[in-house]
Amino acid sequence: MKATKTEIETRLKTVYSMITSGLNNTDICQNMSKIYNISHRQVYRLIDKAIIRIKENNIPEYEKQRSIANERYNNLYWESLKKKKYRDCVYIQSRIDKINGLENNIININTNANKKDPYQEFFEAFGEIK
């Protein structure tokens, strides 16, 4: 029997509160299956919807924290660049990319192909920091 919109909303609110109280997906799934007699597949759909709702409700706070993290990482990046700590720069840039949802864009540097510094191309394009 198909649940009504009211029942679905009640279940969604229950999952939402379980997530925000710190329960993991397995515990949520077990509890929801017992309480509402629904399948694990239905519970995981509710979990996905609840996570979307949590994100939507917390966008301003998320953006504020992301902005703070970006500023902190940018400062670290430029300090490392001034000290010519290029490996640190690459790592810090990967953190910046992750914060901004760009972590899937990967640059493959093949250092065996030539003997020059793998970061030389970067500095040829953007210039040295003085």
Image: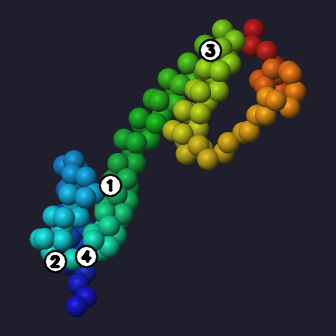
Q: Residue 54 got which mark?
A: 1
Vertical relation: 116 (above or below) 27: above
In primary-sequence order, the first of circles 2 and 3 is 2
Secondary structure, mark 3, is: helix
Q: CA distance from mark 2 to mark 3?
A: 56 Å
* Frontmost residue, 111 versus 22: 111
Q: At 38% from the left edge and 55% from the top edge, which residue is drawn?
A: 56
**Amino acid at dot 2:** Asn
Q: Nearer the viewer, residue 33 or 81?
A: 33
| Residue 67: % across, % down | 48, 33
**119 lies left or right of 93:** right
Question: What whole-number distance in Å separates the C-alpha atoms at marks 4 and 3?
Answer: 52 Å
Front-lying residue, 81 or 61: 81
Amino acid tagged 4: Ser
| Gap between marks 2 and 4 measured at Cα | 7 Å
The residue wearing badge 3 is 80
From what the image shows, is residue 120 above or below residue 113?
above
Which residue carries the number 4 mark? Answer: 39
Amino acid marked by disc 1? Ile
Image: 101 above or below 35: above
Pointer 2 or 1: first along the chain: 2
For the C terminus, the quadrant is top right
Q: Residue at x 79, y 34 (%)?
A: 110
Numbered disc in front, either 4 or 3:
4
Q: Is residue 108 left or right of residue 96?
A: right
Residue 8, picture quadrant: bottom left
Residue 127 seen in the figure: yes
Asked which secondary structure carries label 4, the reply is: loop
CB of mark 2 within 8 Å of CB of mark 3? no
